[in-house]
Amino acid sequence: MDERAGGTAPTYHVPVMLPEVLSALAVDPDGDYADGTLGGGGHAAAILDLVRGAGHLYAFDADPGAIANATARFAGDLGARIIVRQAYFTEACEMLAAEGIRLAGVLLDLGVSSRQLDSDQIGLSYRQEMPLDMRFDATARPRSAADIVNDDSPEKIATLLRQYGEEPAAWKIAQAIARGRSGRRIATTTDLREVIESMIPGHFLIKTLSRVFQALRIAVNDELGELERGLAGFIPLLRSGGRFAVLTYHSLEDRIVKDTFRDEERSCICPPDFPLCRCDKVQRLKVLGRKPLLPTAEEIERNPRARSAKLRVAERVEGMVKHNL
Ligand SMILES: C[S@@+](CC[C@H](N)C(=O)[O-])C[C@H]1O[C@@H](n2cnc3c(N)ncnc32)[C@H](O)[C@@H]1O
């Protein structure tokens, strides 16, 4: 396998479920593909290796660091076989639609890369002291994590921790944050960690910190809203038979993908007691596999960050437009 395809030493990020993703995309050498979550470019390199004919790979990431890395990694092919742009999903879909591109496949590998966590510049990890920011692209998002913990009401912070972190002690933590910020600003990851450490017993601490940091990251980057808009934006760009592969890492993301794919598979949403279909719903996807694919035990052993991954795959179909209204 090509070094670029992540076969040897990708220190930036080890691509998760790579063989399963490639098989799900059933790459056509002449097809145009989109990778909405370029990261270290491991999946992208492997897709590019298979797109050997007239096809292209359009690769996006919100993080300028990922774009700089990919610009170096793919220097030889840049602008020709692979087109790299800094963009959140919403903008990525707008760019592709404006160019009239019909995709043979889309990959979204959600969440964050190992590089973002390990050489943390933006305060994603409670293990290193950094400004509490968490924005993948600070120019595109108005509020940092520090703005949320310092300026929002305890009620709002508790809702966020519950909703995005599924945190059982959400209200207690929100109150501790409100006490911790009186007379000073919670400005760094360490400041926030200390507030949580002061009230959560040691054996629950790491899991609680993970949930709180995850919740803030999701909120700051509007990750769930982006996912919904990304799914809605990429589906119409797929050509008939085109594949949509999405890797999720927690239940909130997975539920959105599962529900969207299921909804897009339906061709009628009329109430069950209607004798004839009166709605204008058109089927746009066929879900491939009732259950999500999971990483093998061997992959999890090799790469523990794969352990929570779920891969869902759907195929674009051109449903019948109804003329029954
Ligand atoms: C798990 S990593 C992708 C790793 C990549 N597949 C690889 O093989 O190296 C997820 C990446 O998606 C980016 N990302 C997350 N949500 C995004 C969004 N809504 N729009 C654009 N990029 C996003 C993150 O900045 C991160 O670089």
Image: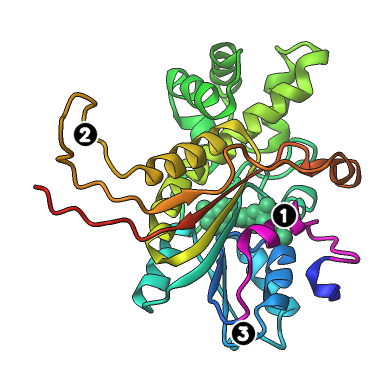
Q: Earlier in the sequence, mark 1 or mark 2?
A: 1
- 85 or 301, which is in the foreground? 301
- What mark, if any, has residue 270 been given in the picture? 2
Determine whether 167 is above or below 36 in the image.
above
In this view, the residue in front, 97 or 312, is 312
Instruction: Give the x, y percent position of residue 139.
Output: 48, 59
Rendered image quadrant of residue 34: bottom right
| Numbered disc in front, either 3 or 2 | 2
Residue at 48% across, 64% down: 241
Amino acid carrying mark 2 in the image = Cys
Mark 2: few, some, or many residues within 10 Å (few <14, many ≥20)? Answer: some
Which residues fall within the magenta stretch?
A: 7-29
Few, some or many C-alpha atoms within 10 Å of disc 3 (few <14, some 14-19, many ≥20)?
Answer: some
- Displayed-image quarter of ligand 1: bottom right
Q: Is residue 276 magenta?
A: no
Which of disc 3 and disc 1 is earlier in sequence?
1
Kindly identify which numbered label has been placed on residue 81. Answer: 3
Question: Tag count in the figure?
Answer: 3
**Closest to the observer, 260 or 191:** 260
Q: Amino acid at mark 3?
A: Arg
**Main SS category, magenta section:** loop
Viewer-closest of 133 and 106:
106
Residue 9 belongs to magenta span: yes
Q: Secondary structure at mark 1?
A: helix
Q: Is residue 150 left or right of residue 317?
A: right
Q: Is residue 324 left or right of residue 297?
A: left
| Label disc, if present, on residue 20 of the rendered structure | 1
